[in-house]
Image: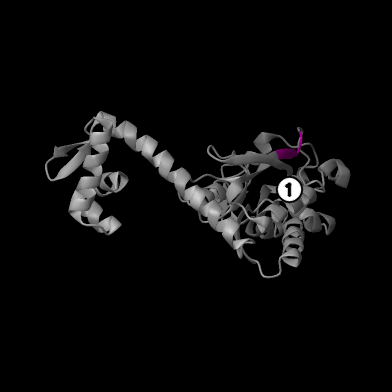
Amino acid sequence: MFQAVVEAGGFNQAAQQVHKSQSSVHHAVHKLETALGIPLFENDGRRVRLTEAGELMLRRANFLLDEAHKLEAVAANLQCGTETQLRIAVDIIFPPTLLYKVLNKVSQEYPLLRIELMETVLNGANSLLKSAEVDIAISPFAIKNGFSEDLCEIEFVAVAHPDHPLHQLNRPLTIEDLKSHRQIVVRDSSAERKAESGWLGADQRWTVSHVRTSVDIICQGLGFAWLPLAIIKPQLNQGLLKPLPLDKSGVRKGLLYLCFEDGDRLGPAARAFIGELRYQSMTLPTAEAEGFLSL
């Protein structure tokens, strides 16, 4: 009730929020103040405002209430046994064929499990995890509160269509060469933070919302981009894309993290997904092993 008064800005509003009478809310807060021996609120016109001691108590109360909610969720999972739904946010640079293998293996083990997959870009996965819209996130960024584990390295290759003007220079390319041509970049899917992925030095830029759109545009000779090797292997093998001959390495690496808020709240199916994900992530190809560095 103390938390509700703070959030609502008054006792009457808090009473409506928690579906109690105003006197019940007022009595509960007064009882808390009496037990602590300090005032938590002071009047500020028609609203109440936290005292300095009240602000400290709110921080502590929020932590305790959050832990209580987690405890209830863990108890609910233990009571229900295997979960019926698994919600996963996956950054689009994670190899889809590998992901499908993991999901299929988990579905075979838990045939009644409903899986909800959300494809994200940059901060999008962690944003969904923070708002409790997903249970697990595969993200380019670690989370501050919760669990983050190095999952795998994703190699990005600078590519363009074989007929693109950059390939017609017939010499090692510099950054200055890239700046004079159109770059295709992918937009952040998070509502909180907007960013774009990859090197952003080109004067001309098209911004898209999915890596598949970027691949399609580049295959038509309309630009260049740094794209995940594991995703563009078919296009490289078919000759639709060709690595750019940069004077410095045309391969860059980015780390993906496995993230979740509280491991105790994850059920058997989620744990099975994590275990299979770790195993499959060990099989990712590298540019050197695939022979693309010599092209």
Disc 1: which residue: 159
Of 205 and 211, the residue lying toward us? 211
Q: Splitting the image into 4 quarters, where does residue 215 fall? A: bottom right
Where disc 1 sits, the SS reads: strand
What residue is drawn where x is 26% and y is 29%? 52
Q: Would residue 238 be found to the left or right of residue 104 on screen?
A: right
Does residue 114 sit above or below 293 in this rendering? below
What residue is drawn where x is 29% and y is 56%? 18
Question: What secondary structure is the stretch in magenta mostly built from?
Answer: strand
Which residue in the rendered view is the most extreme toward the bottom? 112
Q: Splitting the image into 4 quarters, where does residue 6 fall? A: top left
Q: Splitting the image into 4 quarters, where does residue 250 fall? A: top right
Is residue 191 visible in this depiction of the protein? yes
Of 254 and 295, the residue lying toward us? 254
Kindly identify the amino acid type of the residue bearing the numbered disc 1.
Val
Queried whether the magenta region covers residue 251, the answer comes back as yes
Of 97 and 289, the residue lying toward us? 97
What stretch of residues is rendered in magenta? 249-253
Q: Residues within 10 Å of mark 1 (few under 14, many from 20)?
A: many
What residue is drawn where x is 57% and y is 52%? 206
Rendering coords of residue 154 (x, y %) = 72, 44
Q: Would residue 292 be found to the left or right of residue 51 on screen?
A: right
